[in-house]
Image: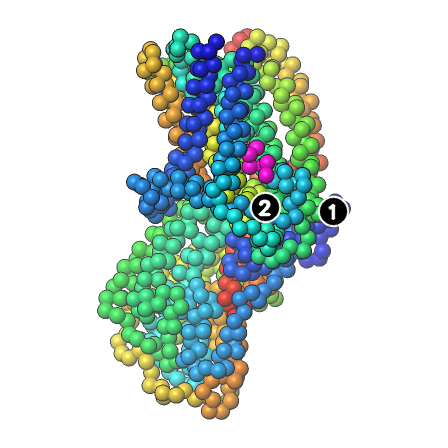
């Protein structure tokens, strides 16, 4: 019993601390990556290669004055103060159902690790992730609503429309993956993708379900409010949208939640469409070595998609709101439906 | 476009003050908006936050002392501001400028045009969410400003011309360095175009936005790229050539549809044409003095004079009313292109979304130093 | 029930993290409150109307309603998708019928201009 709880606690501590450590790393990658793309130096003064810059930023944000606009009173004030915390809590707790490594049946303190996932026996898997992640829209809407600022309000209501629209496309694009793997559990989804077709094509879902993969990735960009879909913030139009009035650690909470969401989104892309920790033609060694290698493979794939987020942000212009909605409703949803129809038709024909 | 738009639903419209402290209004422009959701029902530009009384200042200072004030009109491209002023003063005083001075003025003015257009591209792109072109364009602008600095010691407010010519000749090696720069520029323009011209999101955000027909553009008195984007081939450098623009070859690019995308293409091509003009000027740069023989104290005859130049933003004109033997104009009026171009803003954004307002402000390429004077 | 223990622990961590950081920030951050500083403003000018008493476009509600409709339908797809291999062709055809009904609603919404913005 105690061993079991100890294992759980260790998992929780490791996963949450890694998740939160990734935030400053991603901030650094984003800033240095932007500098690289833009032909300039980027932060290079604090520590080697400016690596300590995010820490300095955090200290700065913590010591900043926290302002609440006057006129934000009563319930509005409660919502105003609550919104950043919601953003961060939701962003972190989504990661429970994300498996991040291969477990060849390892034991810790005499108790089975039960997979590199915080909640191994959660049979809802992907449903849990979508359910919790969709709560994230509350933080943006409440922040926008409670700020008593019209720009924030516009950011908030834009967010409500944008995030729900793309959530729909995101959910539908996953249906095809669930059909082939026959389980909600993401570990099963990954296991289903091991091996190869014809000996050289990895059995990753991205190859037969390229449409689904593209719609999922695009929707993931929209859900994390990253450029080209950052209309919720859109500094050129809405100043910075829903978090215009926030300062100090409350602003930092929004900021961190964005990066945590990026990590989760990248992990989901890798798990659902790019084979998770599997690598074709590579037999994972047994024991702890195998576990570490599989986590390493997963980390590399996630890192690529995190870089992809950064890469796209510094390359593309921003959509306009009506174009965004049109893309979501008129292009993404039909494409996502088409994806699972094709998968379904293919599977039905094979089973005939 | 004209006429009031009927709201689809019975809603209370949102009054929104867009600016003066806004990241996308290019200075202290304030646009009072009436919004139905995201749709602009009415836009009213409110100006004057940067008023410094430049025209009034001119009445108190001698002609050459006025030139630093002109730098502060369109502070992004100072050479054309100086050029317009000295041309008007020379016309008033009947001074002929030596050819070398004219050519150097043209080089400076065209460098100023390029530096203004790259800054326009930078801010326009960043307004539409493309952040990276900003840094690329600043890289080139930096090199142009270095050339300015080498010539006159200043980078932004150049004060680089005098009535009757130029204060200094070019420093040694300047021509070679300028030549090297302009040879490399077209390659960089290609870089910007790679990022934007065929980008589908860029096209979606600019095609059909802020459309203004040729007739409307003329009625509003638009000049510069906003006018040429609508297909009117009008450029002061061609129609009323000043300096030695009649001796160099260049094209006037025009657009077809009068939308934001066409104006973007027009400006991109103008930069290439500027490079062409500078190349010709550098090749033909005559020897000789850079200053005409002018008296120490400039005294004007009684009269009214107007002279204009093709500034990067449009027609920049200076009008002087002088009394006999006066050392300063009795009254000076400046025709700033941004001020007149801004008039078209309400018509161009009505019925569009808030995001398009940003695009239209960007495409008009206004600078508040010139609008508020 | 033990399946949910990790979730409880993790959520506790997730909840405590913002609370702790906000508390730390509260202790060490600078603070010189001033009523003028907290005054809401719009781009540098005092707002004539506050955000609390402005209304916004009904189109946002329309999107929200459409989302509720289609999202509930999408949830029905999930159990079907997971069981797809066992339901075989029958399940596929059945879902086609369901989708056809859904599609009718979608096409109706599209044709009525509910998905148009400007």
Left or right of residue A174: residue A148: right
Considering only vertical position in the picture, is B155 above or below A292?
below
Instruction: Report, in whole angstroms, how far the alpha carbon at label 2 lies from the one at label 1.
Output: 29 Å
* Residue B197 showing in the rendered view: yes
- Residue range in magenta is A81-87
Q: Residue at x 27, y 59 (%)?
A: B180
* Residue B357 showing in the rendered view: no
Q: Main secondary structure of the magenta part?
A: helix
Q: Residue at x 67, y 19 (%)?
A: C98
Subunit of label 2 = A
| Labels 2 and 1 share a subunit | no
Considering only vertical position in the picture, is A148 above or below B29?
above
**Numbered mark located on residue B11 in the image:** 1
Disc 2 versus disc 1: nearer the observer = 2
The spot of residue A113 in percent (x, y) is: 42, 12
Quarter of image, res B104: bottom left
Q: Quadrant of the C terminus of chain A?
A: top right
- Crowding near the residue tagged with mark 2, few <14, some 14–19, many ≥20 C-alpha atoms within 10 Å: many
**Numbered mark located on residue A68 in the image:** 2
Subunit of label 1 = B
Relative depth, front residue between C76 and A110? A110
The spot of residue A164 in percent (x, y) is: 61, 32
The spot of residue B239 in percent (x, y) is: 47, 71
The spot of residue A306 in percent (x, y) is: 42, 32
**Numbered mark located on residue A167 in the image:** none
Question: Could you tell me which secondary element the residue under label 1 belongs to?
Answer: loop
Question: Could you tell me which secondary element the residue under label 2 belongs to?
Answer: loop
Q: Please, which residue is most extreme toward the front here? A: C27
Relative depth, front residue between B137 and C116? B137
Q: Please, which residue is most extreme toward the right here? A: B10
Magenta span includes C1 = no
């Amino acid at each position: 019993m105690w061993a079991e709880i100890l294992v759980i606690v260790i998992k929780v501590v490791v996963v949450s601390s890694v998740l939160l450590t990734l935030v400053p790393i991603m901030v650094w990658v984003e800033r240095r990556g932007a500098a690289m793309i833009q032909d300039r130096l980027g932060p290079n003064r604090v520590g080697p290669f400016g690596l300590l810059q995010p820490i300095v930023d955090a200290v700065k944000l913590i010591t900043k004055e926290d302002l609440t606009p006057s006129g934000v009173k009563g319930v509005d004030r409660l919502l105003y103060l609550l919104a950043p915390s919601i953003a961060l809590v939701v962003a972190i707790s989504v990661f429970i159902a994300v498996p991040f490594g291969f477990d060849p049946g390892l034991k810790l303190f005499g108790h089975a690790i039960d997979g590199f996932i915080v909640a191994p026996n959660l049979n809802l898997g992907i449903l849990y992730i979508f359910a919790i992640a969709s709560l994230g829209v509350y933080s943006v809407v409440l922040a926008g609503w409670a700020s008593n600022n019209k720009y924030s309000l516009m950011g908030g209501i834009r967010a409500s429309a944008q995030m729900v629209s793309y959530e729909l496309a995101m959910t539908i694009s996953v249906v095809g993956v669930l059909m082939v793997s026959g389980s909600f559990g993401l570990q099963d989804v990954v296991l289903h993708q091991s091996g190869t077709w014809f000996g050289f094509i990895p059995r990753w879902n991205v190859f037969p379900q390229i449409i689904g993969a593209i719609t999922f990735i695009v929707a993931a960009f929209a859900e994390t409010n990253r450029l080209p879909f950052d209309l919720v913030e859109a500094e050129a139009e809405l100043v910075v949208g829903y978090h215009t009035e926030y300062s100090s650690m409350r602003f930092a909470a929004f900021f961190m939640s964005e990066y945590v969401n990026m990590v989760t989104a990248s992990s989901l892309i890798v798990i659902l469409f790019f084979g998770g920790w599997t690598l074709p033609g590579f037999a994972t060694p047994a024991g702890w070595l195998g576990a570490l290698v599989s986590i390493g493979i997963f980390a590399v794939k996630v890192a690529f998609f995190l870089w992809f987020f950064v890469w796209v942000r510094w390359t593309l212009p921003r959509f306009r709101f009506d174009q965004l909605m049109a893309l979501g409703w008129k292009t993404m949803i039909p494409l996502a439906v088409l994806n699972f129809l094709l998968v379904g038709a293919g599977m039905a024909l094979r089973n005939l | 476009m004209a006429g009031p738009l009927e709201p689809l639903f019975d809603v209370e419209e949102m009054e929104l003050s867009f600016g003066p402290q806004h990241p996308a209004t290019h200075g202290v422009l304030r646009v009072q908006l009436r919004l139905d959701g995201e749709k602009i029902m009415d836009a009213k530009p409110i100006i004057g936050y940067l008023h410094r009384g430049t025209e009034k200042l001119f009445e108190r200072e001698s002609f050459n002392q006025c030139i630093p004030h002109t730098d502060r009109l369109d502070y992004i491209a100072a050479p054309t501001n100086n050029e317009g002023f000295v041309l008007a003063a020379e016309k008033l005083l009947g001074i002929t400028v030596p050819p070398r001075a004219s050519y150097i003025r043209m080089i400076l003015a065209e460098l100023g045009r390029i530096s203004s257009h790259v800054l326009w591209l930078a801010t326009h792109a960043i307004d539409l969410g493309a952040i990276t072109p900003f840094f690329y364009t600043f890289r080139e602008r930096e090199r142009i400003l270095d050339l300015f600095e080498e010539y006159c010691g200043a980078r932004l407010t150049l004060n680089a011309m005098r009535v009757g010519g130029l204060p200094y000749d070019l420093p040694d090696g300047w021509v070679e360095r300028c030549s090297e720069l302009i040879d490399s520029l077209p390659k960089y323009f290609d870089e910007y175009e790679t990022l934007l011209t065929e980008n589908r999101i860029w096209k979606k955000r600019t095609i059909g936005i802020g459309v203004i027909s040729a007739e409307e553009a003329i009625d509003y008195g638009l000049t510069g790229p906003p006018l040429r984007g609508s297909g009117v081939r009008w450029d002061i450098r061609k129609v009323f050539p000043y300096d030695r623009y009649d001796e160099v070859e260049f094209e006037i690019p025009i657009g077809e549809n009068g939308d934001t995308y066409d104006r973007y293409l027009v400006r991109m091509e103008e930069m290439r044409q500027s490079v062409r003009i500078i190349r010709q000027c550098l090749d033909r740069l005559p020897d000789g003095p850079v200053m005409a023989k002018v008296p120490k104290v400039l005294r004007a005859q009684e009269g009214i004079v107007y002279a204009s130049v093709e500034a990067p933003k449009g027609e920049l004109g200076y009008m002087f009313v002088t009394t006999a033997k006066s050392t300063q104009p009795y009254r000076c009026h400046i025709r700033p292109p941004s001020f007149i171009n801004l008039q078209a803003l309400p018509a161009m954004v009505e019925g569009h979304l808030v995001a398009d307002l940003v695009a239209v402000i960007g495409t008009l390429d206004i600078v508040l130093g010139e609008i508020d004077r | 029930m033990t399946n949910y223990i990790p979730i409880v622990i993790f959520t506790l961590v997730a909840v405590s993290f913002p609370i702790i950081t906000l508390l730390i920030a509260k202790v060490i951050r600078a603070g010189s409150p001033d009523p003028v500083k907290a005054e809401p403003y719009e781009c540098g000018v005092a707002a004539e109307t506050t955000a609390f008493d402005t209304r916004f476009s009904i189109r946002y509600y329309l999107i929200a309603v459409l989302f509720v409709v289609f999202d509930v339908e999408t949830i029905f797809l999930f159990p079907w998708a997971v069981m797809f291999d066992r339901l075989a062709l029958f399940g596929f055809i059945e879902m086609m019928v369901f989708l056809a009904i859904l599609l009718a609603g979608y096409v109706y919404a599209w044709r009525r201009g509910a998905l148009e913005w400007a």
